[in-house]
Image (cartoon, coloured by chain):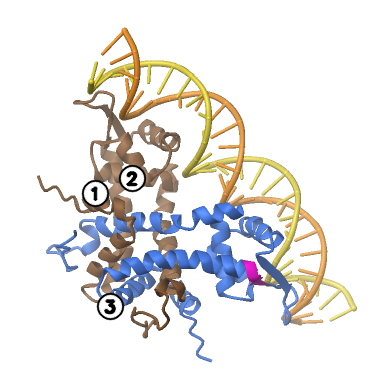
Chain colours: A blue, B brown, C orange, D yellow
Amino acid sequence: MPDAIPAFRPQQLGKDILAESPAYDLIELFFFAYRDFVSDPDRILDEYGFGRAHHRVLHFVDRNPGLTIAELLDILRITKQSLNRVLKELIEKDFIESRTGTSDRRQRLLYATEQGHDLAVKLAKLQTRRIMRALADLDSDTKEHVSRYLLSLINPDDRAHVDRLVFGAKKS
Amino acid sequence: MPDAIPAFRPQQLGKDILAESPAYDLIELFFFAYRDFVSDPDRILDEYGFGRAHHRVLHFVDRNPGLTIAELLDILRITKQSLNRVLKELIEKDFIESRTGTSDRRQRLLYATEQGHDLAVKLAKLQTRRIMRALADLDSDTKEHVSRYLLSLINPDDRAHVDRLVFGAKKS
DNA sequence: GAGATATGTCAACAAGGCTGACTTAAAGTG
DNA sequence: CACTTTAAGTCAGCCTTGTTGACATATCTC
């Protein structure tokens, strides 16, 4: 057990903390945790002939009905050619539906179909199981600390966007 | 800001928490944070003609001098053919050195060279910068909460192994 | 000496990224 | 209305990094 994680505090020398020893613990734990976290859905995706790229697309479309191509590209940070390859398959296999935009008819508004939604939820619950098991071992305020930390890791210019996407902060 | 993250507590219905709503917030924040976190080293790796696979290998070899191929495969969870492709390049370009084992001469013990170490540290510091900036905004005990959470996300059977690797718990 | 083990290698393939060039339809603009 | 811009789709080809399967070599263990 990591029973003595030293608290973060300024170092003795004049230079800032960045010049000092790397945060190997958080770097490596992040790697191992992410490795196991994303591996959960793999077996199920395989049964459908899908990969992780399909999962990401389906997830964000399911969570944001009416998402446009441009918005999805901005979330995933891939090219439209890469997106189109997996999106086409999801549409052909009837997991996602593409409707022409109403206010702007150039846009395609994406929606998960019923079976698309079912799969998205199934995978999300699988990952939620791992998260809940982890949180169950820990202090009740861990979730809050972790949420804030992860949000702060994100590039500052995207933070507000992600915050809106994740927490659905619709002030209007 | 996520100013009202509800605390984790059991739901009203008989089924356990897993049957209830997915933890979309932690799932998505993990995705976005990891996306930005791993993107930092990319530009530098590019200058050396390396990719993320090279980074992972170099990182763990630098952090664990004398690592064997089998141990590295167990950390990365890839096939030896995949490993060998990138490892060969790292050795050819003189970022990693492979020595024949002493007690078991079948083994290859891997060591970062001086320039290998320099690059590994350079990349680790880049990622540390992002981590420190995130922690700077947050409570002083965030790091501890996050460390424990990430460790708990890891598959239980690997947790002790990762703990040893990351925190170097050499009790002997 | 026989079998197991650690590593290396060849060949082929798949997933999922990328660039560059081009098309179409619709919207915005003078 | 003509022109430009924008949203999306597509074709072709390439790269990285993962996979399987088969086989080779050196070394250790019994």
Q: Using the rendered image of the protein, determine whether residue B86 is visible from the camera's viewpoint.
A: yes
Read off the chain for label 2. B
Residue A113 is covered by the magenta coloring: yes
Residue B28 in the image: state x and y as whole percent.
45, 69
Q: Mark 2 points at which residue?
A: B75
Label 3 CA crowd tier, 10 Å (few <14, some 14–19, many 20+): some
Residue in the foreground of this view, choosing between C12 and B135: C12
Q: Name the residue under label 1.
A: B165
Type of residue at label 3? Asp
Q: Name the residue under label 3.
A: A141
Position of residue A35 in the picture relative to residue D11 (left or right):
left
Residue B110, label in figure: none
Give me the residue at 26% from left, 28% from top: B99
For the residues labelled 2 and 1, say whether their Cβ atoms are less than 8 Å apart: yes
Q: In which quarter of the image is residue B13?
A: bottom left
Give me the residue at 28% from left, 67% from top: B146
Read off the chain for label 3. A
Label 1 CA crowd tier, 10 Å (few <14, some 14–19, many 20+): some
Q: Using the rendered image of the protein, determine whether residue A23 is visible from the camera's viewpoint.
A: no
Type of residue at label 2? Ile
Label 2 CA crowd tier, 10 Å (few <14, some 14–19, many 20+): some
Region in magenta: A110-115
